[in-house]
Image (cartoon, rainbow, N blue to C red):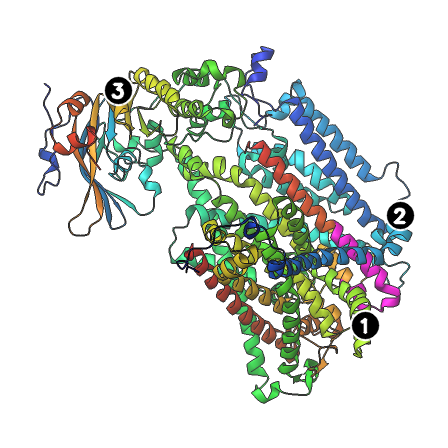
Amino acid sequence: MSVKPAGRPDKPTLGSLQRSRSADVRGQVFLGLLLLAVTLAIGMVFAVLLSVIADGADVLSSRLWGFLSNPSSSDPVKAGVVQGIRGSLLIAAIVSVVAFPIGIGAAVYLEEYADGGPVTRTVEIAVRNLAGVPSIVYGLFGLAVFVNTLRGITGGSSVISGGLTLSLLVLPIVIITASEAIRAVPSSLSDGAYGLGATQWEVIRTQTLPSAMPGILTGSVLSIARALGEAAPLLVVGAAAFYTTGFQGFLDQFQGAFTALPMNVANFAKLPADQWAGHAAAASVVVLVVVFFINLVAIVARARITKRLGR
Amino acid sequence: MNETRVIETNRGDRDDEQLPSSAVNSVFTTRGLTVYYGDFRAVGDVDLDIAEGEITAFIGPSGCGKSTILRCFNRMNDLIDSARVEGSLLYHDIDLYDDAVDPVAVRRRIGMVFQKPNPFPKSIFDNVAYGPRISGIRGSMDELVETSLRGAGLWDEVKDRLDKSALGLSGGQQQRLCIARAIAVSPDVLLMDEPCSALDPIATGIIEELMGEMKKDYTILIVTHNMQQAARVSDRTAFFTAEADEATGQRRGKLVEYDDTSVIFSNPADERTEAYITGRFG
Amino acid sequence: MATAMRPDQDVKTSGQTAPWSPVLPTLTSRGVVAGVEVILYLVIVIMVAIVEYYVAGPITDFGLSNWWIGFVVYAAWTGWNWAGAQGPVGSYVDHFIADAAGRPACFSCIAVRQFTRFGILFGIPFLILDSNVWLSVALMVTTGFVIAAMPDRRAPWDLIAGTTITQSLAGEASVELPVLTKPSDLQLSGQRVAENRRAKRLLQLAGFSSVIISAYIIRVIFGEAWEFVAASDFEWGLLRDIGWFPRRNKFDLSTLFVGTLWITGIAMLVAGPVGLGVAIYLSEYASPRLRGVVKPAIETLASIPSVVLGFFAISFISPTVLQPVGGSLGIDFGIFSLISAGIAVGILTVPIVASISEDAMRAVPRELREASYGLGARPVTTALRVVFPAAISGISAAFIVGISRAIGETMVVFIAAGGSGGAIFEANPTEPGQTITAAMASLGAGTDSVAGSGIAFQSLYFLGALLFLVTLILNVLSDAIVRRFRQEY
């Protein structure tokens, strides 16, 4: 029996090239575990959505309009979320008016004007870290500044205070997404415009911003969705659990007591479950519908504008 | 007078004022033009006289700084934070780097065509009308757009789809659209930074032919990697090279030779030029 | 732009010799804009109606309720505007776009036009909502000016509909190079220079405001926290007590720390394996088609508001999962427990861990994988021995961000962990408990509402400062790690 040189295997047989199922047990088990993780994750999505819809079906099917159009009440049959809807709409309006111009402006400044010096780095670090601060900390800031210090303007715990607080919360998100969108605009476009004798602002206005618009718009719309899902800062700012309103004048709409849709969910969830669980679930469904709808709008708007820009 | 001008580089104690004044018809006169990126001296001591109504080609190996020099002529280097320009650059006897000069106004007179076709994501019409509109020119753009597109030899191909996106054009058409866009503001000079390097031979041929026609209206400076192209289209050729600095080991660009194209390609004065054009250059 | 007009097309085809000849959007694009605006108006009207309904009761008189008047006014105006594509009336409207020489009209002219257009849209609903006429007029005017100040003086939905309204021209344009004799001939018009400078200043202001805001947030939070430390005659001993009862001056921080640790730990036990499993599957195994299904599903999870998860914890996790399982193991679960809240926080954290780890693994160069396969390694070996170690820094960053998010999560714990005003020190996760965030929420909310002063109020800021510091450190850490792993490739 001759000794083969080390390192040179026998001639291959068909068997040695075949997949051997038994040998790869480890691989099969691993893949099984991965699939389990994926199934669990997707299961979580469905469990949340289905259980909330199932719990809320009763309220939503028996008195949908009443639920959407009634204010808060201690009577489960009368209670509704119209105050939350109104509050959320006003908050969305305030966020778009306050956070979008500042955020998009700051992003343009950071990407187009800033020189990479210490000042710019400070701005960038500040923005990145603001994005990671827990939302409730913003609530504390809102409580100290908007509710207490600026009480004369905001009227205390009002939708103005809540809206401004959430504007600060989404500001870093708007800045970061807008910056990314602007950075993605190819420099050949701005070079072309500069080469034709455009000023920096003209380049930004006619080339950079239009090309970055899909990304900026998507980021902005998603940040609205984020603001509409937030409850913790509003809780601290003092969104009211129950309040009754007589006829409200224009200013009272903004300066008076307020609540928002996620606060409705939280308030219902804190009440005895036997009577109020259905309300909490129904309010959750309303929040989810609003948030998913906004996400959808972002996706559609992005696709539409991207197509228009021919890219 | 067909003197052979070999520019001596790295002359230490030169006095700009005492150099013979540039030819009457020269558009640009540079003396000791040097560009730094931060502390790195990318290309230095370039002395050139660019004649009006001619095509001047810049050739040389990669990294020799020919594009960098080209970008001085319309102050595109101002857009790079770390770039710094020294020496003098006269445009019709006006110092382009004078404090009173606004680089934006310079670029309106000195147009540029880039390496990769970069039409704006707008209609063909809006691409051509972009320059006139931003420089505040009012009135109907129809005639202007047509003239410019004809000037770039593109009119017949696109006249029926002026409102369609420019991104639907082929690469060669896009590059000619960029030329039309540049000439729409009636510039004095056109800078072309390797305009054909992204194009196929047929599109390249069309653009080379176009350049021959355009030179009666514009002074053209072209950077090219393609020596045959320089030999075909240009009247004068400047050869740049990159040489390692003895102290730092960094490769820095310098101008070796500037002369009539025929001289450069048939009887170069410098052996480095000869080595390059005969392909013996690494 | 497909629908964009060629300048002066209308004028040429109609053969008119108007003293000024503005270029107008096409009829179709105007129609699209009008449609969008009518829908917007209806949405606003419906919103107003809902508010009106609950403020003043059901509207019985639908016939001439004033928001119908508003709609009629608006519809008439829109029709007028639409007709403006050709008619003489429309020409008058468009006079506000361009002057006779074809230059865009002055800023205020365009503002006036835009506030008639959009001011009616947004102003009238508020006019109806409230009888304060001047306020409504102010709102209308402001809206007009805001829109006139936008790029191209268009509203955002004009961009979607693709209209251009400022391009207006008279006569053929001619281009001539100005004479050039001295350096100052190479200058821009003062107007363009000024516009450029104004834009820069404005954008700079926006950029710096974000720094000022963050600096101010830090100042306020830490300032108030310091007041707590100073005013409470602070001794560290105070922080160890029977529990967290801020109204009774019992600030046992360990109660909150234990709660926070449990929540974070349980959340990461859920989110770590699941998120990582999903990430490995998506980056190493999934076909592009499957990825296209799984990834949006996981992203959906990320967009579910945390209040909904809080409710899910008490309506599903506790009664349907924990209580039966606990019952069979002999553990007694209530509806409110740290475990239940922790699992819900974990569900919220899954998409964060999954997406950041997946990014890290996809950033591993293809060549590394191919080298491994080329040596005959199986997928499992490649994933665990090659890709995982190469992506380890990114994956740890994902876990750190996940932890930071779990620590900061408020509403789930506030709803589902059961601690309201205060909590006795409790180390058992099957019992209700309190976290830093939930304690803050309780202090701020009705359950244990605190007025604008006093030591309990300031304890809120003490906790806030603590939370801020912890999450800041975690974020800086993950940032540093991520940057290192970017440098590797």
Please name the residue that numbered disc 2 is placed on. Answer: C58
Q: Please report contact status of discs 3 and 2: CB closer than 8 Å, yes or no.
A: no
Residue A274 within the magenta-colored segment of the rendering: yes
Please name the residue that numbered disc 1 is placed on. Answer: C323
Residue A86 position (above or below residue A74): above
Q: Nearer the viewer, residue C275 or B90?
A: C275
Three-letter code, disc 2: Pro
Residue positioned 66% across, 63% down in the render: A233
Three-letter code, disc 1: Gln
Residue positioned 70% across, 67% down in the render: C343
Residue C400 position (above or below residue C192): below
Residue C211 within the magenta-colored segment of the rendering: no
Would residue C15 be found to the left or right of residue B44 on screen? right
Three-letter code, disc 3: Arg
Q: Please report contact status of discs 1 and 2: CB closer than 8 Å, yes or no.
A: no
Which disc, if any, is residue B232? 3
**Mark 1 falls within which chain?**
C
Question: Can residue B218 be seen?
Answer: yes
In this picture, which residue range is highlighted in magenta?
A: A266-289
Q: Are marks 3 and 2 on the same chain?
A: no
Q: Quadrant of the N terminus of chain A?
A: bottom left
Q: Are marks 3 and 1 on the same chain?
A: no
